[in-house]
Image (cartoon, grey):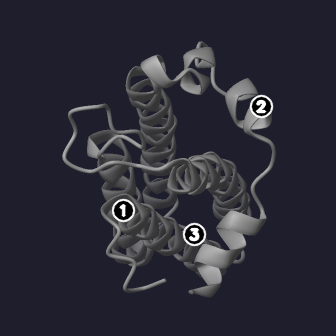
Amino acid sequence: MSDLYNRIVSERGSFERLLARIPGIRGYVEKGARRESNDMLRDYIATQLSQRVNRLAQIERTLLDNGGLGYMSKTQSAKTKLQTFRDRVKTAAPGYSGFMAAVKIDDEALERIYAFDEAMIRYVDQLDDALNTLQTAVDSSDGINEAIAALDAITIEANEAFTLRDDVLTNIGSTL
């Protein structure tokens, strides 16, 4: 198993803590409402990620206004990865398959999906921290390259984690 997979599964908090972070998601626990609730969860996370994409675009404008044209290829790369992550979350297969679905998710796999769902929310928090650091670096004109690199690293890891989530859903698990 990969280190990232092990870290995500071992860092998971309580299921209740995951639900407490998402408004209106109580139905996630009830089997009959899991698919709808999973869609709500993914929509919520995708909306949060869209806000981070917009914030990065604002930081880029500030950077450009302060003569930071040389940083644009790096920020664009990070923004593209962030947008890809958002799009993957938004369009992902649900974490619960209903009775007639082609792929059945057993309870153990469902628990792993919950861990990955919680990790997606933690990535939103990490992106906030990285964007705060980047904003500070842009404002002070110091440490911009390092801040962009840290943001880029989080977007790469988030996308890798999402690939692992897909592996759990499809049972291919070749990277685990």
Q: Quote the CA–CA distance across marks 3 and 2.
A: 25 Å
- Side of 161 relative to 74 (left or right): right
Give the answer, above or below, for where 146 lies relative to 163.
Answer: below
Pick whichever, 128 or 60, lies toward us.
Answer: 128
Would you say the residues marked 3 and 2 are in contact, meaning their CB atoms lie under 8 Å apart? Answer: no
- Side of 102 relative to 3 (left or right): left
Q: Residue at x 56, y 16 (%)?
A: 27
Give the label on residue 16, or none.
2
Q: Position of residue 59 (x, y in %)?
A: 52, 51
- Side of 66 relative to 57 (left or right): right
First in sequence, mark 1 or 2: give its number. Answer: 2
Q: How crowded is mark 3: few (under 14 residues within 10 Å), some or many (20 or more)?
A: some
Q: Residues within 10 Å of mark 1 (few under 14, many from 20)?
A: some
Pick whichever, 58 or 95, lies toward us.
Answer: 95
Residue marked by disc 3: 154
Q: Which residue is drawn at 42% across and 48% down?
A: 57
The three-letter code of the residue at mark 3 reads Ile
Q: Where is residue 107 in the image (x, y as percent from the top left)?
A: 55, 47
Q: Is residue 174 visible?
A: yes
Q: Where is residue 65 in the image (x, y as percent from the top left)?
A: 46, 54
Give the answer, above or below, for where 144 lies relative to 17.
Answer: below
First in sequence, mark 3 or 2: give its number. Answer: 2
Give the answer, above or below, for where 168 lies relative to 18.
Answer: below
Residue marked by disc 1: 166
Q: Quote the CA–CA distance across marks 1 and 2.
A: 23 Å
Q: Where is residue 38 in the image (x, y as percent from the top left)?
A: 45, 31
Give the answer, above or below, for where 50 lies relative to 131.
Answer: above
